[in-house]
Image (cartoon, rainbow, N blue to C red):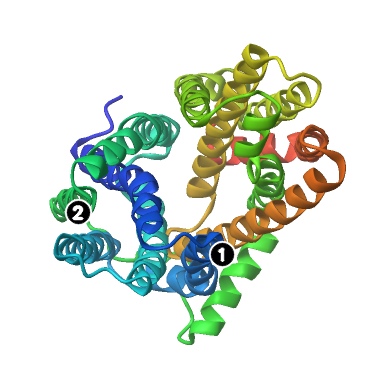
């Protein structure tokens, strides 16, 4: 089954914006380091990025359910292109105060939330339900390659050559993404007639999305599991660079190579996700993925052998991709089209909160018990999420039969 030209445009737009994301992941911190030597000021950039996302995500979900989603994708990417073009001009002229970077991080966070939410809502309008596993897997694989292997080293090389160059190329990449979404020819206005239209008031609309999410047992389970998985993920990853240095003996180059190797697991996960689902169904695929995540962190908690740790972390990334593909496909099929933005925003909000909680817990555990114990705690939390899904396998089976995907 071919996914169609509309999907290819969405895929290309996502790939181009992911390239921009990968470049900025390295280039912006490098730029910040030329403006200040204060660790607190550098850490504040992460807050400037995450806080607006938390505050805006629910409202953005309402917007996605009320406005032509194609136009939102164009707006989000063209706006980011303009933002980074302005930043490139400031860097080129040598007039970039740190306050400008704070603004860039804040605006970037809001626009990224808008773009991600709109892209999630658009995909099931462009791809048939039976093709969503494959489509989400391909998008995840492309994101892994571009975000992990292409964008970061490209951003570093460009920055060394000319500090303004990464921002300039980022602006071009976002502009190309906007053009790809502009070329979409389908109808991406918010559909009606499914009984889940957005109430007039913003707060009422947010509440209706949260209530629907809570009452749909499959979606509620996935959202709760996703929030707990976010906590578990961030517990060890919040201090991973210190673990790599002190326990594995890796310097900056070695740490980068370790991350690149583990990203190969993302390609493995993308390759097997839809195949697993066809063989054993959504429920068992999700359980298996979460079980692999628990096993991977459990192994890391017991050894500091570099080869074993690298393979275990690669399997962890593989699990994360399979889980994300399955959870996305189920939510896209289960959620009414006119409520896709609001339900997605509830999931993203809890995920962002989970990442914050995980970072705090990880720092506290690492300070009190060393760098290995938090991996065990995170692995145990993944085991809990797997057990939660095992207990609801019948629910997944009933949903698949009702949807005709079993």
Q: Which residue is mark 2?
A: 164
How many residues crowd around disc 2 within 10 Å: few (fewer than 14), some, or many (20 or more)? many
**Viewer-proximal residue among 25 and 19:** 25
Q: Is residue 62 left or right of residue 6?
A: right
Residue furthest to the front: 37
What SS does tag 2 mark?
loop
Image quadrant in which you'd find residue 26: top left
Q: Which residue is mark 1?
A: 40
Q: Is residue 214 visible?
A: yes
Viewer-proximal residue, 53 or 243? 243
Label 1 Cα neighbours within 10 Å, binned few <14 / some 14-19 / many ≥20: few
Using residue 107 as the reference point, say whether residue 219 is left or right of it.
right
Residue at image coords 23%, 54%: 167
Farthest residue to the bottom: give it.
201
The x and y percentages for residue 283 are 67, 32
What whole-number distance in Å separates the C-alpha atoms at marks 2 and 1?
Answer: 24 Å
Q: Secondary structure at mark 1?
A: helix
Dot 2 or dot 1: first in sequence order is 1
On the rendered structure, is 11 left or right of 308?
A: left
Q: Residue at x 69, y 31 (%)?
A: 246
Residue 73 placement (x, y as % from top left): 27, 59
Residue 391 appears in the figure: no
Image location (x, y in percent) of residue 359: 68, 52
Instruction: Tell whether 350 sits left or right of 185.
Output: right
Q: Quadrant of the N terminus?
A: top left
Please give the name of the residue rendered at 38% of the width and 58% of the height, measured from the top-left corner.
Answer: 32
Q: Determine whether label 2 and label 1 are within 8 Å by CB.
A: no
Q: Is residue 109 above or below residue 234?
A: below
The disc placed on residue 390 is none
């Amino acid at each position: 089954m071919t996914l169609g030209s509309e999907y290819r445009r969405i895929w290309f737009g996502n790939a181009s914006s992911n390239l921009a994301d990968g470049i900025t992941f390295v280039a912006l911190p490098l730029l910040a380091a030329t403006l200040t030597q204060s660790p607190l000021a550098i850490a504040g950039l992460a807050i400037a990025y995450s806080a607006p996302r938390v505050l805006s995500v629910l409202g953005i979900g309402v917007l996605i359910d009320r406005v032509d989603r194609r136009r939102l994708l164009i707006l989000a990417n063209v706006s980011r292109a303009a933002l980074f073009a302005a930043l490139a001009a400031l860097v080129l002229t040598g007039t970039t105060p740190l306050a400008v970077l704070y603004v860039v991080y804040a605006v970037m966070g809001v626009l990224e939330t808008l773009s991600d939410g709109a892209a999630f809502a658009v995909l099931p309008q462009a791809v048939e339900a039976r093709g969503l596993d494959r489509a989400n897997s391909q998008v995840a694989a492309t994101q892994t390659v571009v975000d992990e292997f292409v964008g970061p080293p490209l951003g570093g090389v460009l920055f060394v050559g000319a500090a303004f160059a990464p921002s300039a190329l980022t602006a071009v990449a976002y502009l190309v993404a906007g053009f790809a979404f502009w070329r979409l020819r389908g109808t991406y206005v918010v559909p009606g007639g499914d009984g889940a239209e957005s109430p007039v008031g913003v707060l009422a609309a947010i509440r209706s999305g949260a209530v629907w999410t809570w009452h749909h047992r499959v979606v509620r389970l996935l959202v709760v599991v996703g929030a707990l998985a976010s906590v578990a993920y961030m517990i060890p990853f919040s201090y991973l660079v210190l673990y790599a240095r002190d326990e594995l003996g890796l310097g900056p180059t070695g740490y980068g190579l370790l991350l690149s190797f583990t990203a190969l697991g993302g390609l493995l996960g993308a390759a097997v996700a839809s195949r697993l689902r066809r063989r054993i169904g959504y429920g068992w695929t999700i359980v298996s993925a979460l079980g692999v995540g628990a096993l991977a962190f459990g192994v890391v908690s017991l050894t500091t052998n570099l080869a074993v740790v690298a393979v275990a972390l690669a399997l962890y990334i593989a699990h994360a991709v399979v889980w994300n593909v399955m959870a996305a496909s189920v939510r896209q099929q289960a959620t009414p089209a006119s409520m896709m933005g609001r339900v997605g925003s509830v999931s993203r909000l809890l995920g962002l909160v989970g990442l914050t909680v995980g970072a705090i817990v990880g720092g506290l555990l690492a300070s009190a018990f060393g760098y290995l114990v938090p991996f065990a705690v995170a692995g145990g939390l993944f085991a809990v999420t797997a057990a939660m899904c095992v207990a609801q396998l019948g629910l997944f089976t009933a949903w698949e039969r009702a949807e005709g995907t079993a």
